[in-house]
Image (spheres, grey):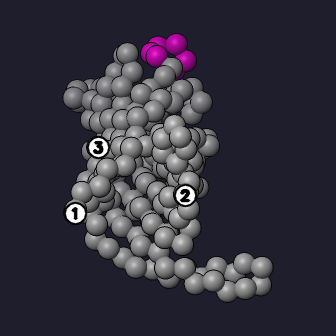
Amino acid sequence: MKKLGILTITLFAGLVLNAQETKSVDTYKIAFYSKDATGVFKEMSGKVTSDEVAKTDSTLGLKFDLKINVASINTGNGVQNKHAKSSEWFHAEKYPTIDFVSSSVYRTEKGVFAKGKLTLHGKSKNVVIPIEIKSTESKTIYKAQFSVNRMDYALGPKNKVSRNIKIIAGVSVKK
């Protein structure tokens, strides 16, 4: 699904019109792994905005605004799913989404990175996430693999399981 939007920016008392192309997330996969638990989130929504005017050699002109539905967690075990959604862990009722909003997407000699704010369990942290971008004729695929310390987000009890959670995310956007 394509949308074309016009953004008006006032900069130094001048008026700049900037065409942006916003695309909705078509398919996705969000999985998490630790030495103690694995699972996937079944529902995600969001958009990827491409701003050709903001594009430079190092800045890709992309913006991610993604939301994961916490209640869609699936560990492969119904009892674990219920526990993961409880107040002891994700507290899905109080914190229904995990959000990532990028402030910039840029390229260095080490790869492509999305810098932004990750909000999990009501706590927001600035993060830099390495991403891979692959394009075909019909879609663009964004893949990320990174780790977070769950204690940075007050997620779960302190000593029961590993503090580091590996997150693998893939988002496909139709062209």
Q: Residues within 10 Å of mark 2 (few under 14, many from 20)?
A: few
The Cα atoms of the two marked residues, 3 and 2, are separated by 29 Å
The image shows residue 60 at horizontal and vertical percentages of 50, 58
Return the residue at label 1: 138
Q: Nearer the viewer, residue 70 or 88?
A: 70
Locate residue 38: give its quadrant.
Answer: top left
Of the two numbered discs 3 and 1 in the rendering, the one whose residue sits closer to the viewer? 1
User: In the figure, residue 136 lies in which quadrant?
Assistant: bottom left
Q: Nearer the viewer, mark 2 or mark 1?
A: 2
Q: Which residue lies at the image location 46% right of the left edge and 57% below the top edge? A: 64
Q: Residue furthest right?
A: 12
Q: Secondary structure at mark 3?
A: strand
Q: Which residue is mark 3?
A: 29
Residue 166 visible, this orientation: yes
Q: Residue furthest top?
A: 159
**Image location of residue 53, percent across then percent down:** 54, 72
Between tags 3 and 2, which lies in front? 2
Q: Which mark is residue 57?
A: 2
Three-letter residue code for mark 2? Asp
Q: Position of residue 99 (x, y in %)?
A: 48, 49
Q: Where 124 sits versus 175, above or below? A: above
Looking at marks 3 and 2 on the same chain, the residue that comes earlier in the sequence is marked by 3
How far is mark 2 from mark 1, CA to CA? 24 Å
Q: Position of residue 95 (x, y in %)?
A: 48, 45
